[in-house]
Image (cartoon, rainbow, N blue to C red):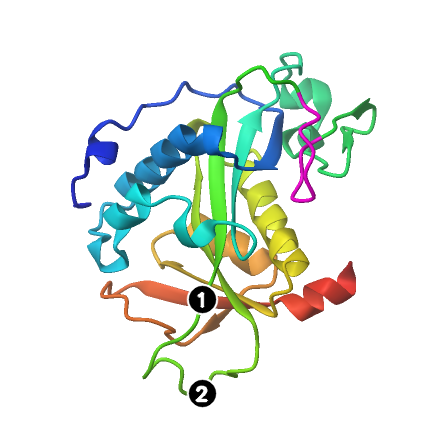
Amino acid sequence: MVQSTKAQTDAVPLTPASAAPRFTISPTTPTDLPDVINLFTLYAESLNIDLSFQSFAEELAGLPGKYAPPAGQILLARRDVRAPSTTPESMGSDCLVPKLEGELNGDRELKSRSSQGGGEISDIPAEALGCIAVRPITFAPPFDVGFDRHTKKCEMKRLYTLPSTRGQGVGKALIGEVVRVAVELGYDEMYLDTLASMKAALRAYERVGFVRTKAYYHNPNEDVVFLVKNLKEEEGNN
């Protein structure tokens, strides 16, 4: 089981989302920290493994820590409080994924905060539906052997969405946005690790170009899978 911490003990079971959430994705601010801690804690509890090898308790206590700008970023997906209640049948599947550059479902403008700054959406508190983060990473011996030491590397961490939103585009949008942010920050490669049992997550990563690679740090779990994405290719496609 995940090592107990006060933040984990106090994790709030968040309100179930609707069948078709509309949402925005934004970089976090200090006022978002309670939601970040709660979602990170729910993420850890969902794994049902001990994350002490990642110093998870210390990570929670020191947030944003390595995820702080300018080298890192934590992103939150929040329900769009201005959007009317919708269903996939009435709006189409694209109502589930925000168009971060401004268009939502082709007929409404949604000005979302982005990593360039902003804050153009309503100040009304909105439910946090999911999170994801990126941080710089270096490989310590012996895990640096065989890797290009001249590439600028980052790591995707803490992808989590509320169970009630799964399969509705929130996770997909978070992955796409954190990759975009990593490219913007000048990284060459993005790494992550996940569990082979998390098949939906694996499929989502592979669909956006992550491929399997060898271990880049010590993870004691037997079914761990290590992945990498070439961000230079991503940059060329934009």
Q: Position of residue 113 (x, y in %)?
A: 67, 34
- The numbered mark at residue 146 is 2
| Vertical comparison of 84 with 195: above or below | above
- The numbered mark at residue 137 is 1
- Which secondary structure, mark 2? loop
Q: Is residue 108 left or right of residue 164?
A: right
- Which secondary structure, mark 1? loop
What's the magenta region?
A: 112-121
Q: Position of residue 228 (x, y in %)?
A: 51, 68
| Vertical comparison of 226 with 69: above or below | below
Q: Main secondary structure of the magenta part?
A: loop
Q: How many marks?
A: 2
> Could you tell me which residue is drawn at 61 percent across and 70 percent down?
188
Q: Residues within 10 Å of mark 1 (few under 14, many from 20)?
A: some
Q: Depth-wise, is mark 2 or mark 1 nearer the camera?
A: 1
Inspect the image, locate mark 1, and give the three-letter code of the amino acid beneath it: Ile
| Vertical comparison of 72 with 90: above or below | below
Q: Residues within 10 Å of mark 2 (few under 14, many from 20)?
A: few
Q: Residue furthest top?
A: 84
Q: Nearer the viewer, residue 216 or 86?
A: 216
